[in-house]
Amino acid sequence: MYLGVRPEGVLLTAPQAKILDDEFYLSDPLSHFSSRIAMLLASKDHVVPPTTPTQPGFFRALGLSGVDALPPISQTGHRVQVALDALALRHQCAEAVERFLYAVTAESAASDAACMWLAVAESPPRTIDVLKATKARFDADQQLLLRLMFPAGTPITDDVLASARTALEWINHASYLLTDDELSINAAHNKLKHGLAVAARDDVRIELVTIGPNENGEVPLSAFGEGESVPIFDRPLLTYLSRPHARPKQGLEAVSLRVDLDTVLAETWMMATVYAALFHVAARNHFGEDLPDGVAPFPTLVIGRTPDRVLGGKPLATGHP
């Protein structure tokens, strides 16, 4: 028995669904993502000492004695790991937004009582099925996003419309991150998640130079530097193997994603605020106007900071056959 939910058969009853959603809507998705973002930003410039501080609890859990420090961590390894964690967080946020949208717009299953927690948990395994179903619902109702993002009775002002347009841009960006074939960003996340089938490094630098090579094919050192060359890839790179989805079957590609930590986390935060608005309105619809303590407040929505503006035309990746 969980939270007072007593089993009454294989189907979820309305009282059981209410008890479950009463608990579910006390979650705080924006706090989850904001905390992770803050941790990664704090780690960005953190200098890893040659040896880590004593961790007695860790070694007690292992039943080890005579060891008082974890192995040294290189500064390079630390920077790369922070970048990988940022990518994983962005992907989690994108999928959270899309699966919640699917759940909040889905028709209740005929067998079970309507339960948002269950609808998210049992959303289709294939992301593309989630996105197709949600898109069909939005195509059929042009006012749907406004109802999902703003409490009933909200005056539809220019700012409300502008924030809805910005939110829609980030919902579409989440879809892009989950389905894009050109860079296969979703494949990158899966290869990072399932077995760590990736290579990551932060010592690759590619620059656009304005001074061409001499007759020996050499480029002078003076061709590099501020005002002379433009950095293209100067951040950690995550490289993974992927095959394009095409017929006939295509060859293997090694794709290297450029991980600009600040930009990746900014993308994550923008998607997280959209998720938080959707979540708050759904919680208000569930509880009514008398919201219990613990329901996360409606977030501050940023207007006009679209994905194109945040990404700013920065290079995203390079691919090699």
Image: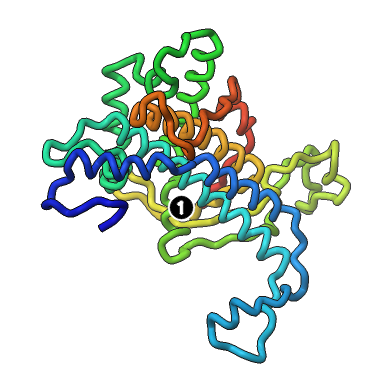
Q: Nearer the viewer, residue 205 or 169?
A: 169
In the rendered view, would you say 19 is above or below 276? below
Q: Is residue 285 visible?
A: yes
Pick out the residue farthest to the bottom.
66
In the rendered view, would you say 68 is above or below 224? below
Q: Nearer the viewer, residue 254 or 42?
A: 42
Residue drawn at point x = 16 percent, y = 37 percent: 109
In the rendered view, would you say 75 is above or below 124? below
Looking at the rendered image, the quarter that the N terminus falls into is bottom left
Q: Nearer the viewer, residue 20 or 231?
A: 20
Question: Callout 1, which amino acid?
Answer: His
Instruction: Answer with left or right where residue 93 lies relative to residue 128.
Output: right
Residue 44: x and y in percent read 70, 53
Residue 225: x and y in percent read 84, 44
Residue 165: x and y in percent read 49, 18
Q: Is residue 181 visible?
A: no
Residue annotated with mark 1: 189
In the rendered view, would you say 18 is above or below 139? below
Pick out the residue farthest to the right.
222
Residue drawn at point x = 79 percent, y = 40 percent: 229
The colour scheme of the drawn protein is: rainbow
Residue drawn at point x = 31 percent, y = 52 percent: 3
Instruction: Answer with left or right where residue 226 lies relative to residue 284.
Output: right
Q: Nearer the viewer, residue 122 or 306?
A: 122
Residue 68: x and y in percent read 69, 83
Residue drawn at point x = 32 percent, y = 22 percent: 138
